[in-house]
Image (cartoon, coloured by chain):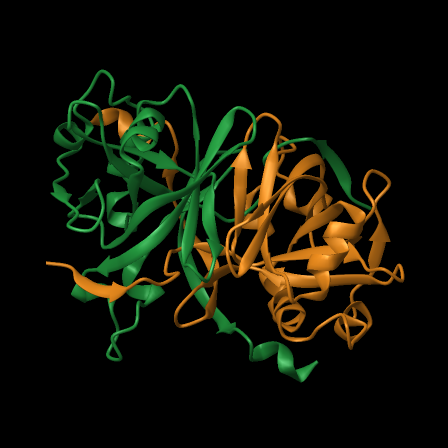
Chain colours: A green, B orange
Amino acid sequence: MKKSLGAKTLAFPTPAWAVATYDANGKPNAMLAAWAGLCCSKPPCVAVSLRAATHSHGAIVARKAFTVNVPSAAYVKQADYLGIASGRDADKFKTAGLTPVASELVDAPYIAEFPLVLECRLLQTVEIGLHTQFIGEIVDVKADDNVLNELGDLDMDRLRPVVFGPGTRHYYGVGEFLGKAFSIGRDL
Amino acid sequence: MKKSLGAKTLAFPTPAWAVATYDANGKPNAMLAAWAGLCCSKPPCVAVSLRAATHSHGAIVARKAFTVNVPSAAYVKQADYLGIASGRDADKFKTAGLTPVASELVDAPYIAEFPLVLECRLLQTVEIGLHTQFIGEIVDVKADDNVLNELGDLDMDRLRPVVFGPGTRHYYGVGEFLGKAFSIGRDL
C-alpha cells in the first residue's frame, strides 16, 4: 500500500548540472539545474528547465546557446554556489574560483574545472509553466582525460558526478556498480 | 585540455525509470527510459522521451497518461528487462513478475513493487527527432512507507534508486551523502 505525497516534483535520481552562458554584456555566467535530462538520440539533445526570472534564461534566449557542465563530487560546493547566487549581482565564476573557456562551437562558455562538458545550440524552447524548457542540440561533448577509461570511454567511477535528491534537497555521489544494461535483464 | 568525444548523448547521471501505460487492448505495459527528467515546478512536471517505434509511444498518445516508476536497486534486473523486451510481443509485467495497479487518477497502471510512483496526465508532446518527448503533469506521487524517513520525507538512502550511465551503459547505485543543497555553497 503506497502513501500519497501529493502533486510534487519528487523523482530520483536528478542531475546537478551547471548551465553556462554569456549574458547581454558578454559576462560568463553559470547556474545549477536539476530539472534536466537527455531527451533525444538523433539529433543528440539535452533539455534544461529554467525559470524566466533567472539571469541565465535571458542569456539563452539571446545567444541561442548554452553548455551543460557536469561537476565531479569534488566540486559539489562550487556547484551548489552556482545554484544560490544570481549572475545579475555576482561574478559567479570569479567567486567560485572557476575558469570560463569560450566554446569554439557555440556562443557560450564552459567550465574548465568540471570534467565533462556538453556544448549545445538551442534547438527548441518549450514553455511549460513556471519553468521554460530549453532543448539544446549537443554539437560536441568534451571530457578530461582522467575521466576516460583505457578504451577512451567515459567512466562513471572516474567521473564521480553529483546526484541531486529533490525534497530533502541533498547531494549524493554515485555508488556501486549494479550491472550492465541491455544484459542483466535477459535472464528473465 | 579537454578531449572531444563528438556529438553524443553522454551526460551523467541519467535516471532509469519505468514508464507504464495501458496499450490499445488495455494490457498494462512498461518500458525503461533514461532520456528523462523533471522539467517544471508549477505545474509539477516530468518529461520522458520515447522513440515513435516503441509500443509505449502509441499508448501514451492514445491514453494521454503514463506513470513514472522508480525502481530500487533491488529491482535493477527487472528494470533492465523492461528496457529489452517489447510490449508488442510480450506481457512484460508477467515475465518480470511485477504487479500492475490501476491508477485511480490517470488512465495508466503503476508498478506495485517499485517504491516510488509518479502518476502523470499528458500535458505536452514535443517532437524532437528520433525521440518524442512527453511532458506529463504529476497529479500525485506515491511511495512505499519504508522509503520515507521519520519526517515522512523521501529518503535517498532508503529508496536506493538506480543511476544509468550512457556510453558504457552501466547501472549504478546512489553513493555517499555529499552535502545539503542551497547550503554548502554559502561559504564561497
Q: Does B183 appear above or below B127?
A: above
Q: Does B83 appear above or below B118?
A: below
Looking at the image, which residue is at 79% across and 51% down?
Answer: B62
The front one of B110 and A105 is: A105
Q: How many marks?
A: 0
Q: Is residue B69 left or right of residue B91?
A: left
Q: Does A124 appear above or below B30?
A: above
Give the farthest residue toward the right.
B25
The front one of B125 and A9 is: B125
Query: What percent of the width, then of the height, locates residue A103?
Result: 17, 47
Query: What percent of the width, then of the height, locates residue B35?
Result: 52, 56
Q: Is residue A164 left or right of residue B36?
A: left
Give the farthest residue toward the top.
A89
Looking at the image, which residue is at 24% across and 69% down?
Answer: A148
Query: Can the viewer see residue B19 in this picture?
Result: yes
Check the picture and name the quadrant holding the C terminus of chain B: top left
The front one of B122 and B14 is: B122
Check the picture and name the quadrant holding the N terminus of chain B: bottom left
Q: Is residue A15 left or right of residue B26?
A: left
The front one of A122 and B38 is: A122
Query: Can the viewer see residue A10 in this picture?
Result: no
Query: What percent of the width, then of the height, locates residue A125?
Result: 45, 36
Tell me which corner region of the image, top left, top right, bottom left or bottom right, holds residue A21: top left
Query: What percent of the width, then of the height, locates residue A142?
Result: 23, 59
